[in-house]
Image: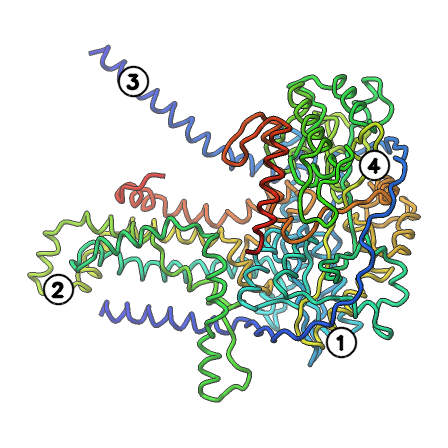
Amino acid sequence: MKTVRAFLLMVCVGALLSVMACAPAATPAPPPTNAPQPTTAPPTSAPANTQAPAVAPTTAPAANPTNPPKPTPTPPPPQVTAAPGALKIQFWHALTGASQVAEFQKLADQFNAANPQYYVQPILQGNYAATLQKMNAAITANSLPDMILGNPGDLGTYDAAGVMLPLDDYIKDPTDGLGALASQIDPALYFDTFDNRIVGISNGRSIQVMYFNADMLQATGFDKPPATFEEFEKVCQAVSKPPDTYCFALVPGASVFANLDWNQGGAYANADETKATFDDAAGVATLEWLKKLADKQWAYIPAAAFGDQTDFGNGKVAFTIGSTAGLPFYQNAVQGSSKPFKWGIAPLPRAANGKNNVDLFGPSIGILQTTPEKQKGAWQFLKFLLSKEVEEEWAQVTTYFPANRAAAEAVGAMDPTTVTNKAFASVIDKYKLAVTFLPDGKREPSAAAWQSVRDIVANMMTAVFTGKSGADFAATDPAGAAKEGVERVNKALGEFGK
Amino acid sequence: MNRDRLRKQFGNLLIHLVLGAGAALALFPFAWMLLGSVKSYNDATTAGFIPREWLWSNYLDAITVMNGSVPCRFDAAAPFAILDQCLLLRYFVNTIFVGIVVVLGVLATSVLAGYAFARLNFPGRNLLFGILLLTLMIPFELTLVPNFVFMTWFPTPESWLATTLGLSQEGTHNWINTYYALIVPFTASVFSIFLFRQFFRDIPNELFDAALLDGATHSRFLWSVVLPLSKPALVTSALLTFLGTWNALMWPLLVTNAPQMRPIQVGLTQFIGEAGTQVQLLMAGATLTILPIVILYLILQRWFVEGISSAGIRG
């Protein structure tokens, strides 16, 4: 009898598995079609650098510290369902964060409602690293989406695998191209070009800036943020009182190093971005500067993720470096601090005779090689995302700088008192200030191979800063570390893809 | 005599102090999570251990965010529609469903394999078991892509059957975005096989001899003697497997595309943005997420502890 029961149980499990078949099934990916022939790419050089803007601390925190504006979005309208016969377009993205996910879905719903022949499905795939991992698996299995949002370098990785659609012909198409929009977008900042083909377009960028505690600076006799490395050191000498207060919370990373290297007058990479060059005087000076900050106990490396933000909000550190996408988070951290303070943003310090550079961040959107119909639908959606109204809305949710110049100007002219998005309204003054840094925008090498070497650069910074060598990095002296770093990076770049 | 008693009492006190400290250490993260879940964002990122303000509304906010900022509406005319419309509920249902089926699968395969390795004599038994254990050393990340590729190779049984019988012209569908991909790869667990093998080896041979004399076969002995004696191991294996399924994030993200197919952990990623984390909502969401597991553990605690200790496994 018991055996019969066991058999019945197994049958039930089997039946259960069969019931699962009712789950939505994946549509097999259509075979890739031929990509349009590559055409001439737009110029990729960064615009000329300008003088450092005068930066002043901006508004004091709001009066009520326990009730900060929440980035939580207002509920969007119910999702639009696919019209019968609508062509489904899968859009994989890495826009984590509730407000961005909800807003992006809302935008897709708007597009779907206006274009019932298409049904764009935004699908969150985790953070950028998870999305990259999934895309790599999907490329191997030829189970790809129709559109992808990721870091420019990730798009380069996919392009190296031969799955991305060059957008040059779509952009220039006389009837369905970017048209008037093309003149609104700076290709150097917002287009991603690999092998002279445009593979990605960004609908919003952010930049790397230095966050500073204005009250802390003022208390020690500094009324503006340091513009040069020497000024930075002077501030550090005055404000650092370890272990209670530090000058700088360093989060080692390739972007921070590249920006500091540029500001020391270095190039970070050679002109065709095939080799790293930070073993030159500028690169060594950058590492020496970091070592000095460590030796003098002016700086430290936070243990936790976003620990720099937390410590900044807690008034424990005068400077951090981060993306302008973090403005609302900094605002929240400072606003409710037990000792609220004035804070601001500025470009990273530079050499006394040098010029400012700001590292451009932010994701890009690419279209995968699928069918001509799907590619066309994906292109329509990409154009929709670049339109002025959509860009204006998107900028407020993400604090990204719109690719569309008209949208950027409209957002820049917004009155904080009339902005409906409270989180954005609370940082709009700093956002407007950051816009003035954009002419100094510069991009890190974004080819696929450079993504694989970012950890080497971060490990190099950590080794020099902590003075501890290990399996990740051997040299701890600036010159030796720069040499080892470049050797490792160039070896990895040379071996990439082999 | 008094001195002996004092020494014993002192020893006991010392043991309890150490155990108490260990317990406090283990409970600290939970306390941090619970307290963090009712803090304001500012409190959670800048202040100390105790909330300055108790914001129970964080739980409602967390539910709203995990639900994709869409309110759940129940329609009596179509009660099951809520599973498609209310994401948070769907996440929970998916996770529970997948967890239960995976546990059943793991128990079925592990009990049989564990019994074979423990009580059957066949050539290469130890070698096979060694090879099996070796697979524990392979990191999950390394098998991620090959496993994903496998999922795209297999047709779902129903689409294969429909195509084979000529009932459908759509062609076969692969396992991506189906429960098959979430369940089948996890229905065999080397750890559970090891657990059962260790447990079954401790069952006295006399019991098997007696059963043999009564005419029992291996399957009868397994079903009627071994399994009733193995409740702690069954509970341990079930609980650990369920826990693993409950906490899974990377694999479900990889093999699913529709939010309706995803588990509860995906909901938690909504609080982590590119430039910062909504710590207080993340804590509230995490509290909601682990609640069922804690309840399950409290119910099955006795067998769980027994199973872990009798299988000679220490955490």
Q: Do the residues bearing badges 4 and 3 touch, measured as CB atoms within 8 Å?
A: no
Please, is residue A174 above or below residue A225 in the view?
A: below
Disc 4 marks a residue whose amino acid type is: Asn
Examine the image and state in which quarter residue A336 appears. top right
Per the image, the residue denoted by label 3 is B9
Task: Decide if residue B245 is on the left or right side of residue B60.
Answer: left
Callout 4: 10 Å neighbours few (<14), some, many (20+)?
Answer: many
Examine the image and state in which quarter residue B45 appears. top right
Q: Residue at x 58, y 25 (%)?
A: A467
Q: Position of residue A257 (x, y in %)?
A: 69, 36
Q: Residue at x 46, y 78 (%)?
A: B158
Per the image, the residue denoted by label 2 is B216
Per the image, the residue denoted by label 1 is A116
Q: Secondary structure at mark 3?
A: helix
Colour scheme shown = rainbow
Please, is residue A213 above or below residue B6 in the view?
A: below
Q: Position of residue B121 (x, y in %)?
A: 15, 58
Q: Nearer the viewer, residue B287 or A372?
A: A372
Q: Secondary structure at mark 2?
A: loop
Whole-angstrom CA distance, mark 4 to mark 3, is 70 Å
